[in-house]
Structure formats: C-alpha cells, structure tokens
Image (cartoon, grey):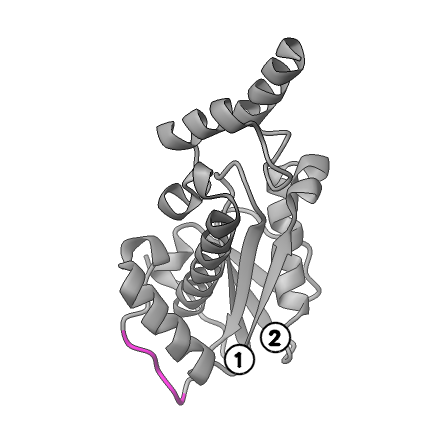
Amino acid sequence: MQIERPNLTAIAGVDEVGRGPLVGDVVTAAVILDPKKPIAGLADSKKLTDKKRQALAIEIKEKALCYAYGRCSPVEIDELNILQATMLAMSRAVEALSITPEFVFVDGNRLPKLTMPAQAVVKGDSLVAEISAASILAKVARDDEMLALDARYPQYGFAGHKGYPTKAHFAALEQYGAIDEHRKSFKPVQRVLLNAKGGA
C-alpha cells in the first residue's frame, strides 16, 4: 500500500503500546525523523527482537529531530476506557514534541484530537517510517516500565508477560490479588476483585 506523503518537513508519526495489558500505563510516542539522517531497519516494533528494538531506540533518539512520550495511567484508563485513554495519550505525545509538526501520521484507524492535519494509517507501523520509530520508542519505554514493576512485584512475572493477559498473569492475580497498577475496569482484574470481596 502506497502512502501519500505531504511535501512538508516536520512530519510526525505516533503509535501506542499497551492497550491489551491488564496493568500499567498505555504508552505512546511521537517522532519527527530527520530526512538527512536515515535510520536503517525501522519496522513494526512487534516484528523486531528485543535487542534490535533497544539498538534502534538509541539510534532514533540520537538522529530524530525530536521525539516525545505520552501516557495515560491505569486510573485514567479506568475512568475514560482504553480507547479514549489511548487517544488522549497520543495527543499528549504530539503536544510534548519540541517541534510542532505540520502533519501527523497516526497508527490505526482513528485520529486523536490534534491541532494540525493528520491521517490514520492501518498497519502504519509497517508502512510509515515515523510511525515505526514511534512504535519502537513506545515499546521499549513500556517494556522498561514492566521490568521496573517486576522488580517491585516479582511474584507477578511482569518481566515475562509484560502485563498481558497470560495464564501466568491470571494465576498470579488469583493468588496475590490486584496491585494499584492493575486496570480495575478490565474484566479479568474485576473478576479477581469481586472474588476477593466475596471471600472477605
């Protein structure tokens, strides 16, 4: 699929990581790449090894004209719902850029509230270099946060499943209950909280 790029210099890409997990922030990144400093190997972060993502994240931070992060906390996710929280986190990332983009490519099929022209691109993380770069930064940032959470709560195994709804995560939830960072509006977490209330 060909993406028509506007003939502008400050084009940003935005992507999110962490819509599906039961714990932690939804993390977004926005990136404006420098056309004079191309980065080889940009791709959808999910298709890269952890080592490759880490190396590319360093290169993106060194070569991009600017980049920024946006996020919504579990409390905000519970208040807004995950879709609205993701949109808000994307807006926050774009607003935090040190250069105001003239145009924004957004991964997915919906646009957050932005003050500049934008285009939603389905599978944009594989089609638009700026979105690929954003997906890598967001993924590395969120994975690092899961490792930090794992150090605080090793019994949940966050380093392994990164907060996603796996058998190991469900088992830990059943055994140890929910922590503050869990998204209380997500059904598996709700279930554990209701069972805990019922058994109390």
**128 left or right of 26?**
left
**Residue 165 is at least partly visible in this image:** yes
| Screen quadrant of the N terminus | bottom left
The answer to which quarter of the image holds residue 52 is bottom left
Identify the residue at horizontal 53%, vertical 74% (top origin).
11
Q: Position of residue 45 (x, y in %)?
A: 36, 58
What is the magenta range? 36-40
Label 2: how many Cα within 10 Å (few below 14, some 14–19, many 20+): some
Q: Is residue 192 above or below residue 128?
A: above
Identify the residue at horizontal 44%, vertical 63% (top origin).
131
Q: Is residue 54 above or below residue 20?
A: below
Foreground: 72 or 179?
Answer: 179
Cβ–Cβ below 8 Å for labels 2 and 1? yes
Label 1: how many Cα within 10 Å (few below 14, some 14–19, many 20+): few
Element at badge 2?
A: loop
**Residue 34 is at least partly visible in this image:** no
Which residue corresponds to mark 2? 102
Residue type, label 1? Leu
Foreground: 50 or 100?
Answer: 50
| Screen quadrant of the C terminus | top right
Element at badge 1?
A: loop
Residue farthest toward the top in the current orientation of the protein: 198
* Residue 49 on the magenta segment: no
**73 left or right of 59?**
right
Q: Position of residue 66 (x, y in %)?
A: 55, 79
Q: Which mark is residue 138?
A: none
Residue type, label 2? Glu
Which residue corresponds to mark 1? 8
Q: Position of residue 161 (x, y in %)?
A: 38, 41
